[in-house]
Amino acid sequence: MTRRFRLAVPMLAFVAAPLVVGCSSAYYSTMETFGVHKRDILVDRVEKGREEQEAAKEQFQTTLEAFQELTTFDGGDLEKLYKKLNKEYERAQSRADDVTERIDSIQEVSDDLFSEWENEIGEMANADLKGKSEQMMKDTLGRYEQLIGKMRGAEAKMEPVLAEFRDHVTFLKHNLNAQAISSLRDTSIAIEGEVSSLVQEMQASIEEADAFISAMST
């Protein structure tokens, strides 16, 4: 992110919502009056998307730990453990929703950016400069497609894991007894594997976001 963008963001708090999918041309025009262009906005949203993925990754691990604590239950307040697991599951769901919202916002501004870029290239008369701009756009688009692919891939892996947690939380709600805990132990290894796979996917997406931000900031 450019220095001028970091300085401009606080000034724009009164004209832009924190995260709005479906930015209008008026929004972009307002941002540009402060020297903040679609490229800057894209980098900023990728940074925020990376932060949301990092937070979601940590929350999924925390939810798994709550589940593991439950499966090692050996007497005590089962209701309390259930409430803790349900709370962690709800936090994981909320984090997953935030990730999706951030990715949608990234895709929104990227579509507008590349559309504008292509139109402006079409208006260029200097063949040499036009060719260089076309190559720059092609390179940037390639990096972006790799990034969004990683992000959407990690996003897709969240729902199956959430579904597993949701099913187990619901099952436990219906059967708050030692026998139910014994049944949950049988599926703990599978859930651990799914969470581990998800965490790897999210880490790969986070690293891809770092590489994209670095390339765009150069």
Image (cartoon, helix red, strand yellow):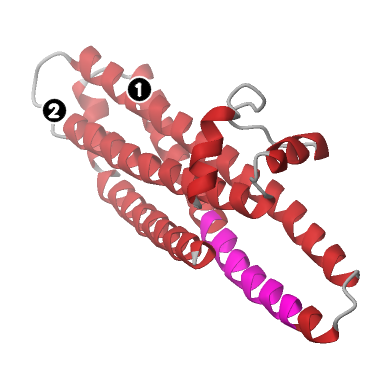
Q: Quadrant of residue 17?
A: top right
* Foreground: disc 1 or disc 2: 1
CB atoms at circles 1 and 2 under 8 Å apart? no
Task: Write the start and end of the magenta stretch as one range.
Answer: 132-151
The residue at 13%/34% (across/down) is 72
Residue at mark 1 to residue at mark 2: CA–CA distance: 16 Å
Q: Check disc 2 and report its element: helix, strand or loop.
A: loop
Q: Position of residue 26 (x, y in %)?
A: 81, 35
Which of the two residues, 168 or 47, is positioned nearer the viewer here?
47
Our reading of the magenta stretch's main secondary structure is helix
Q: Position of residue 50 (x, y in %)?
A: 45, 49
- Vertical comparison of 16 with 210: above or below: above
Which class describes the residues within 10 Å of circle 1: few (<14), some (14-19), or many (20+)? many
- Vertical comparison of 62 with 178: above or below: below
Q: Position of residue 29 (x, y in %)?
A: 77, 40
Q: Quadrant of residue 85?
A: top left
Q: Is residue 116 left or right of residue 123?
A: left
Q: What amino acid does circle 1 point to?
A: Asn
What is the number of the mark on residue 193?
A: none
Q: What amino acid does circle 2 point to?
A: Phe
Does 148 appear in magenta? yes
What is the number of the mark on residue 86?
A: 1
Residue topped by disc 2? 73
The residue at 55%/52% (across/down) is 43
Residue 174 visible somewhere in the drawing: yes
The residue at 19%/23% (across/down) is 178
Which of the two residues, 54 or 64, is positioned nearer the viewer here?
54
- Vertical comparison of 215 with 73: above or below: below
| Numbered disc total | 2
